Amino acid sequence: MRGSASSIRRCLCVAVGSILGGAADAQPVSSRAAEAEWDYAIAFASFAPLNADIFVADADGSNARPLVADRELDYNASFTPDGQSVVFTSTRSGSADIYRMRLDGSNLEQLTDDPAFDDQGVLSPNGESLAFVSSRSGQADIWVLDLETGALRNLTSHPGGDFRPAWSPDGEWIAFSSDRDSTGPKFSFATLHSTELYAVRTDGSRLQRVTDRNALAGSPFWSPDGKQLIYYEADIAEVEKIRSPLRLRGTTQIVSIDLATRERQVLTTGAGEKWSPRRLPDGRVGFASGGPEGGVEFTTGAAGARGEIRNPSWSPDGRRMLFHRDAGGQWPPMRAWPSRDPKFRLVRTGVFPSSSPGGERIVVNDERAASLHNNIVIMSLDGTERTVVFGDPVRNALAPVWSPTGDWIAFGVGRFFQRSQGAGTADIAVMRVDGTELRILTDGTGNYGLPAWSPDGRELAYRASGAERNALSIIDVASGAVTALTAGSSHDNFASWSPDGERIAFTSDRDGDYEIYTIRRDGTDLRRLTHTPGNDAHNAWSPDGEWIVFASERRGFKDESPLHPHNPQAYGDLYVVRADGSEVRMLTDDQFEDGTPSFIPNAR
């Protein structure tokens, strides 16, 4: 039975309220957002942590305890110069902002308050100014905030991304990493970046490039005398391993560089990922290591605690450390998510979500990445009643979509990611909602996937990839007859059908960059909707045909990508655009990849 608009709205609100609790003095933003008015609801997937928490520990990472109980994302913490408080990033009020709090959890202050992404905050040595990364200028720049006057200035103001600011001991310089001279390669939809280190005076003058190795240098930290920078370094080939969805292990090293002579000294050896170095008062360099056996490491002396350690920071006296990790939760998630536009409600769930026609249930992949071995799961909109309706011991089941008639699910099944997983074939399949009556529709000779139902439920548009074509086809579900929708040398992908059945939206690189297009069912009247550098993909129509939601890389990276491993598309935000290409609106603004969106019907 189809739910009414009011019943679907109540279902979403109750679901989020039951999943997300919160401290009595800090109601989660997701619950507050559920009470707001909105016209559309969008389900999507994100590579963000489920629940990042900050921990306070002994210097070696032992005896860790949470800084404060909060169900939103808290991360990237650093000590204030007096060692009594913590500066950190949190999404507790919606977008990522910078906060300050005493170590005992008291005196919470919000230092930045902007719909843009604010992160990676560090206080100056005198505690009077905050340097942080913000996207409020349209890309990731280093900003400085005077805490007394509230005066803000953009220190870097460059089209490239600038990350991880660090104050010199005298407070006169800020070092940072930047991809403004990136040599990172691009493959398929994904762009890799490389970062070099830079330093600039706090008035914006005397910008200088510190490293020049066409590698990736990141997360700088000053020596106590201000003469050296300590950082991690990785070859691009190693970064590709780290970013691989196949969970490959890479190698980075901790390096110091003399600012006067540019002489480098490699401080670590051996395989393994080494991140976020910090010099301790006793002269040691502490850092985090990655991988299953990772944890807290030191350049001299015994290793520290094991486990996930992100962005370690030591107190001025070296006795305590801060770090963050994902406190976890149920996957796939089902929870409200901050949206920059109140007209569009966001619900975070798993990869490739698709709603039933009435909006009461969602079908979704069960793994955290499409390249992993996925089953197909159906669950209620409150995240309960989870049922695996399809699983295969060998083949990956990808991108399930609910039929408009409500009784069938279409999906791709096989091996899809040929670049990372080797040559393979995949087919378009359909099955009943309960997992019965499985039918393979395609002929097994290509790499077919990402199906989209026509509004009448009779046809499926899908991606047909192979040696001779990377385009879109349409198959008649009953007869199996196939017709080509697009042709040529371009890569066409991610088809979605307009509610009236007249047009099909898709992603294509036919003009040199992946953009969103629409085309008539008969292959005529091609229209380009987006015109901004940066891949645009993962598109879906609103139930009324007025909007198309899509994922875009147009604002670039907002952090050093190796710090967010196992995701070759390490950034991307959600946008909506009118069906005629006008009125683009931004919905998410963070450092993670947000993608595979779909509208939840009957949400108005």
Image: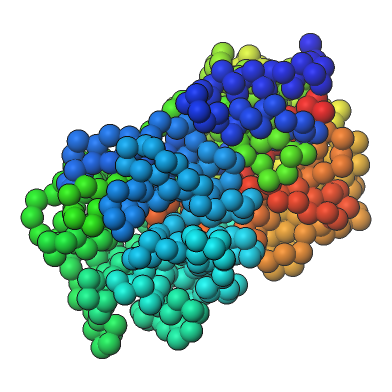
- Residue found at the far top of this picture: 1
- Residue found at the far bottom of this picture: 261
The residue nearer to you, when weighing 447 against 511, is: 511
When asked about the image quadrant of residue 272, the answer is bottom left
Q: Residue at x 36, y 79 (%)?
A: 211
- Image location of residue 210, percent across then percent down: 36, 80
Q: Residue at x 50, y 64 (%)?
A: 146
Q: How is the image coloured?
A: rainbow
- Residue found at the far front of this picture: 148
Residue 535 visible within the image: yes
Q: Residue at x 53, y 74 (%)?
A: 156
- In the picture provided, is 543 more to the left or to the right than 259? right
- Image location of residue 189, percent across then percent down: 59, 57
- Image location of residue 535, percent across then percent down: 65, 59
Q: Could you tell me which quadrant the C terminus lies in?
A: top right
When asked about the image quadrant of residue 458, the answer is top right
Q: Is residue 45 above or below residue 268?
A: above
Residue 361 visible within the image: no
- Residue found at the far left of this picture: 301
Q: Could you tell me which quadrant the N terminus lies in?
A: top right
Q: Residue at x 19, y 43 (%)?
A: 58
The residue nearer to you, when weighing 264 against 103, is: 103
- Image location of residue 100, percent across then percent down: 43, 48
- In the picture provided, is 98 more to the left or to the right than 402? left
The residue nearer to you, when weighing 364 against 15, is: 15
